[in-house]
Image (cartoon, rainbow, N blue to C red):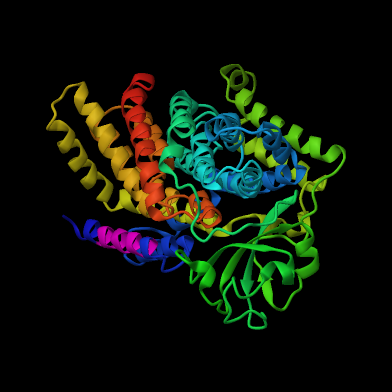
């Protein structure tokens, strides 16, 4: 084993430990790993910077802006509200009505805003119907994840893997390439969520209190400052609704969600509160010295009139255009021009900016910069694993493990299973984009050593990196509904492990039947 392999191994171990313990933001942790490889000569400055100019990373950045434009149209709320039953119903019937639509929407939009928009609406609707909100919020998060694996733009992980595929000199994925297996996973997963998940979920969140059920509620994240009048008081002692017209959904302290009897824990400076309130809250308290509004833009007006439908038309133009642009006749018609997702998301973003679909003067606020830095650094880390020989070294172990089954078709399934398990463990413990970065060079090396087409392994990575169901930290939407629903870690384990198993079995046995090795 060479020095480079040992050094990269230590860098990756430190990176995984830092991500699991949440020492810094994921972007900075991955950037630290990149700098360590740069110092050892494993990465060149060019290698370090290539990820920041990758089409996949830029596409993710622009999709944040497109998602903001569509969110402001208000169409998503109308769609889901129309799908929810407005007469007495059961949990199963309600889930059957709205979960498939949630998956469909999240196949084309970023999962996080979808959950941010729908979670308060579904929670208030459940209370009105006298149904436990806890039966719907984890399934909501999981439905967005299942929808995201069906298209190229459904989740940033798919775009990251596609960018790495093209960097490696292979043909990228088309818009619905992942849907060939993703649709099967989505259908089976939704059936499980609709008919079985509610038996495993709690009937009531711990420390639940009655909250306001007015229409047009939204969620706002605020950070307490030193002039907050309720410092040292608990939520039960300090009537937040009487003071500010908002209900507290959750409290985070030093990046950790307070659980248990969190409503009786005294508030401290710099605590982060997730609030449920109306649109007037930001206008009234946007300049408050008591707290800082962290995740709600002060210029958050919804689109009106024809603009809301124009936003929907633009999104349809982007999706249909990218799909048709990848067809063979288009490539023959314009051989020197690529009408791919990157092209259409660029055009859509520019049109939305100039027509006021989002505040173009504050466009940078709508982007999750830590996600973008994480993605860019993921490309460099993947390159470092290849340059050092680490990827080839681990690929050898994977092939040897598969060979123990024999040089038959069973060996192919074994390699697929091993790669899935490795990727899925990473994504449950760290982040999905980091998991894809660590697994991609392994998949590439396995394929090269075997002399086969690597695409089946790449598809497997996309499925495994998104299948973050068993822990709240595996996916951002899981953390979001944990605070709103008051879930415990064990709730994700009980509901998530069967879903992980579903994705695993379908991926391992269906992918080799669709993509030839």
Main secondary structure found in the magenta portion? helix
Between 410 and 337, the residue placed more toward the observer is 410
Q: Is residue 348 a member of the stretch shown in magenta?
A: no
Figure check: 255 above or below 146 = below
**Which corner quadrant holds the C terminus?**
top left
Residue 268 appears at what percent x and percent y?
55, 78
Report the residue that reaches farthest toward the top: 329
Figure check: 258 above or below 51 = below
Quadrant in which residue 283 is drawn? bottom right
Q: Is residue 286 left or right of residue 479?
A: right
Residue 353 appears at what percent x and percent y?
77, 48
The image shows a total of numbered marks equal to 0
Residues drawn in magenta: 7-19
- The answer to whether residue 171 of the structure is visible from this angle is no
Figure check: 242 above or below 352 = below
Q: Is residue 144 left or right of residue 9?
A: right
**Which corner quadrant holds the N terminus?**
bottom left
The residue sitting at 49% across, 45% down in the picture is 138
The residue sitting at 50% across, 56% down in the picture is 486
Residue 280 appears at what percent x and percent y?
79, 60
């Amino acid at each position: 084993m060479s020095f480079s392999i040992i050094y990269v191994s230590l860098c990756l171990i430190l990176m995984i430990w830092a991500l699991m313990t949440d020492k810094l933001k994921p972007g900075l942790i991955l950037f630290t790993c990149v700098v360590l490889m740069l110092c050892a000569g494993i990465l060149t400055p060019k290698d370090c910077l290539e990820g920041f100019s990758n089409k996949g990373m830029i596409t993710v950045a622009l999709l944040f802006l497109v998602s903001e434009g569509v969110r402001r149209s208000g169409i998503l709320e109308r769609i889901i509200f129309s799908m929810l039953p407005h007469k007495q119903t059961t949990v199963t019937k309600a889930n059957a009505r709205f979960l498939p639509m949630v998956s469909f929407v999240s196949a084309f939009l970023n999962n996080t805003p979808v959950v941010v928009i729908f979670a308060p609406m579904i929670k208030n609707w459940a209370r009105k119907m006298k149904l436990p909100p806890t039966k719907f919020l984890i399934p909501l998060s999981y439905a967005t994840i299942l929808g995201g694996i069906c298209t190229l733009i459904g989740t940033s992980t798919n775009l990251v893997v596609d960018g790495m595929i093209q960097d490696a000199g292979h043909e990228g994925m088309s818009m619905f390439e992942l849907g060939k297996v993703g649709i099967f996973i989505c259908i089976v997963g939704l059936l499980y969520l609709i008919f079985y998940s509610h038996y495993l979920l709690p009937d009531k969140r711990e420390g639940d209190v009655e909250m306001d059920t007015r229409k047009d509620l939204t969620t706002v994240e605020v950070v307490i400052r030193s002039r907050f009048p309720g410092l040292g008081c608990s939520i039960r002692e300090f009537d937040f609704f009487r003071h500010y017209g908002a209900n507290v959904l959750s409290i985070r302290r030093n990046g950790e969600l307070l659980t248990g009897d969190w409503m009786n824990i005294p508030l401290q400076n710099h605590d982060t509160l997730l609030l449920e309130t109306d649109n007037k809250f930001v206008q009234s308290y946007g300049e408050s010295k008591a707290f800082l509004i962290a995740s709600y833009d002060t210029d958050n007006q919804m689109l009106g009139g024809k603009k809301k439908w124009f936003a929907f038309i633009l999104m349809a133009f982007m999706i249909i255009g990218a799909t048709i642009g990848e067809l063979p006749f288009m490539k023959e018609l314009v051989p020197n021009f690529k009408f791919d997702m990157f092209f259409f998301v660029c055009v859509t973003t520019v049109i939305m900016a100039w027509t006021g679909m989002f505040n173009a003067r504050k466009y940078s606020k709508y982007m999750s910069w830590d996600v973008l830095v994480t993605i860019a650094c993921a490309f460099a880390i993947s390159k470092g694993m290849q340059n050092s020989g680490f990827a080839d070294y681990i690929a050898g172990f994977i092939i040897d493990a598969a060979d123990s089954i024999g040089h038959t078709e069973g060996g192919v399934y074994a390699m697929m299973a091993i790669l899935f398990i490795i990727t899925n463990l990473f994504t449950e413990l760290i982040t999905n984009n980091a998991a894809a970065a660590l697994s991609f060079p392994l998949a590439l090396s396995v394929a090269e050593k075997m002399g086969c087409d690597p695409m089946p392994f790449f598809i497997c990575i996309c499925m495994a990196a998104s299948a973050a169901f068993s822990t709240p930290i595996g996916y951002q939407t899981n953390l979001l509904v944990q605070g709103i629903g008051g879930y415990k870690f064990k709730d994700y384990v009980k509901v998530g492990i069967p879903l992980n198993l579903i994705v695993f079995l379908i991926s391992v046995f269906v992918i080799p039947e669709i993509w030839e090795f």
